């Protein structure tokens, strides 16, 4: 865990084991900015990449990384700070790691419009490439990655898929609700979890959303739209 509103300059590592022996290590974020609302992505090797966030009411445009072996931080680079056609504040909304590249979903807010930009950031060379840029009247409300090639975006009345390899944008059946977290599962598709009346599953094969828990067996989930959740497969 990196930063946070109450401790922006600290990180915590929690080591779990099968015998319930939990070990916690707390340290200082040194050599880079701390902050809160930071996107964190593990590369599967020894680095956790830290993207964006805010610190002292200032939006950060950084790409940094943490070495899990040495517990050291270092700066990698920065991403684009300005949108197309206007100057506005930029913040990272989502970040995904794949094959030495970070794929960043950034929001640019100007005086009269919003732009979302999907770009790649090469962690070895620092090269940046814009894959998709889109002007919106309404905010992006969800995003998920299949871990291979496709990133899914849910906007006000749109649901689209963007291929990282071909840069092809495909409009899909719109999600029945505009809010809720999106979760990708390779076996069952995409889940949009919001509350006990508005949980949906999207079939990639059929391009169709289906209401789940139709009989409302979980009708005691009071204010579940604000609660945490995770997807467990057995």
Image (cartoon, rainbow, N blue to C red):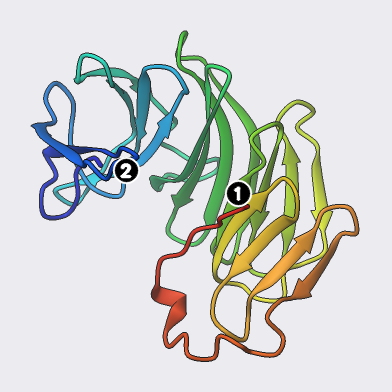
Q: Are marks 1 and 2 in contact (CB under 8 Å)?
A: no
The residue closer to the viewer here, 200 or 154, is: 200
Left or right of 206? Residue 168 is left
Q: Residue at x 18, y 25 (%)?
A: 32
Using the rendered view, name the quadrant where residue 171 is placed: bottom right
Above or below for 8 versus 225? above
**On the image, numbered disc 2 is attached to which residue?**
38
Q: Residue at x 24, y 48 (%)?
A: 36
Using the rendered view, name the quadrant where residue 214 is placed: bottom right
Q: Which percent across, then down, holds residue 135?
A: 62, 53
Above or below for 13 versus 69? below
Q: Residue at x 19, y 18 (%)?
A: 72
Q: Quadrant of the N terminus?
A: top left
**On the image, numbered disc 1 is attached to which residue?**
144
Above or below for 153 versus 118? below
The residue closer to the viewer here, 112 or 234, is: 234
Left or right of 119? Residue 69 is left
Q: Which percent across, then down, holds residue 219?
A: 54, 91
The residue closer to the viewer here, 158 or 90, is: 158
Left or right of 31? Residue 109 is right
Q: Which percent across, then down, holds residue 76?
A: 34, 17
Left or right of 71? Residue 41 is right
Using the rendered view, name the quadrant where residue 20 is placed: top left
Q: Residue at x 55, y 57 (%)?
A: 231
Which SS class for mark 2?
A: loop
């Amino acid at each position: 865990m990196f930063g946070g509103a109450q401790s922006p300059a600290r990180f915590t590592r929690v080591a779990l084991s099968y015998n319930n022996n939990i070990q916690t290590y707390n340290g200082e974020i040194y050599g880079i900015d701390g902050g809160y609302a930071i996107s964190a992505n593990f590369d599967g090797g020894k680095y956790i990449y830290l993207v964006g966030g805010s610190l002292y009411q200032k939006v950060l445009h950084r790409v940094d990384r943490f070495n899990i072996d040495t517990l050291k931080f270092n700066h990698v680079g920065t991403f684009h700070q300005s949108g197309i056609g206007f100057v506005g504040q930029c913040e990272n909304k989502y970040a995904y790691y794949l094959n030495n590249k970070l794929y960043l979903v950034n929001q640019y807010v100007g005086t009269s419009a919003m732009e979302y930009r999907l770009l790649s950031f090469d962690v070895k060379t620092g090269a940046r490439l814009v894959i998709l840029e889109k002007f919106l009247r309404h905010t992006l409300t969800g995003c998920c990655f299949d871990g291979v090639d496709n990133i899914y975006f849910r906007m006000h009345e749109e649901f689209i898929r963007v291929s990282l390899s071909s840069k092809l944008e495909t409009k899909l059946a719109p999600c029945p609700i505009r809010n809720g977290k999106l979760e990708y599962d390779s076996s069952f598709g995409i889940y949009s979890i919001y509350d006990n009346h508005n949980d949906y599953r999207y079939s990639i094969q059929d391009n169709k959303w289906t209401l789940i828990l139709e009989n409302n067996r979980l009708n005691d989930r009071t204010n579940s739209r604000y609660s945490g959740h995770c997807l467990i497969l057995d």
